[in-house]
Amino acid sequence: MKPTRVLILVSLLVAAASPAFADATVFIGSAFNPDNRPVKGFAIGAGILVLGFEFEYAEVSESAENAAPSLRTGMGNVLVQTPFPVAGMQFYATAGGGAYRERLGDQHETQFGANSGGGVKISLAGPIRARIDYRIFKLRGEPLHSVVHRVYAGLNLAF
């Protein structure tokens, strides 16, 4: 291919590329299995069109009286999302993996985990959105509870 054609092709691709976007979320919610416990955390991500990437950290509180362990997760996720809000809502599906630490009293397990789920980012005002998310975590190794369900609501800032 001639250098002029390559230059024209690269110029067209750069001109047609959409800008990247990023966002950050702080959230609170509830984790299930074996008992409802509060969860809090944050996520930060970036994406182009329908594909996004995010890092998320979350901490689930321990409930010793119900033998429900605390759970800390640090997960890297891939999101597939609508490229723009539909009626003010941007839907997404996500999957990923990372590390977790489960602890109940003196027992603990640190290992790899995976998660999948989905949610919606709802436009509120300007770059501020509400985010509602549901995830299923599958924990490897020998955790007390190998499957944990989590739901949360949070505030999301797009930038």
Image: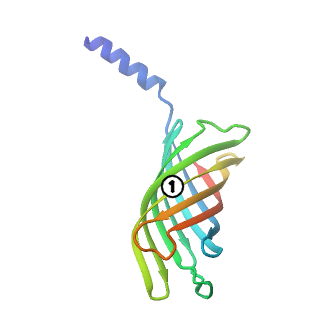
Vertical relation: 124 (above or below) 109:
above
**Identity of the amino acid at label 1?**
Ile
Vertical relation: 68 (above or below) 111:
below
Looking at the rendered structure, the number of numbered marks drawn on it comes to 1
Vertical relation: 147 (above or below) 109:
above
Residue 24 appears in which quarter of the rendering? bottom right
Residue 94, image x, y percentages: 53, 49
Residue 108, image x, y percentages: 43, 81
Q: Which residue is identified by label 1?
A: 44
Q: How is the image coloured?
A: rainbow
Q: In the depicted view, which residue is nearer to us: 72 or 17? A: 72
Q: Residue furthest left?
A: 2
Residue depicted at x 62% and y 57%: 134
Q: In the depicted view, which residue is nearer to us: 1 or 106? A: 106
Observer able to see residue 9: yes
Residue 92, image x, y percentages: 59, 45
Q: In the depicted view, which residue is nearer to us: 33 or 55? A: 33
Image side of residue 25 versus residue 76, left or right: right
Residue depicted at x 65% and y 69%: 30
Residue depicted at x 62% and y 54%: 156
Q: Residues within 10 Å of mark 1 (few under 14, many from 20)?
A: some
Q: Quadrant of the N terminus?
A: top left
Residue 80, image x, y percentages: 53, 42
Image side of residue 35 versus residue 113, left or right: right
- SS at mark 1 in the image: strand
Observer able to see residue 159: no
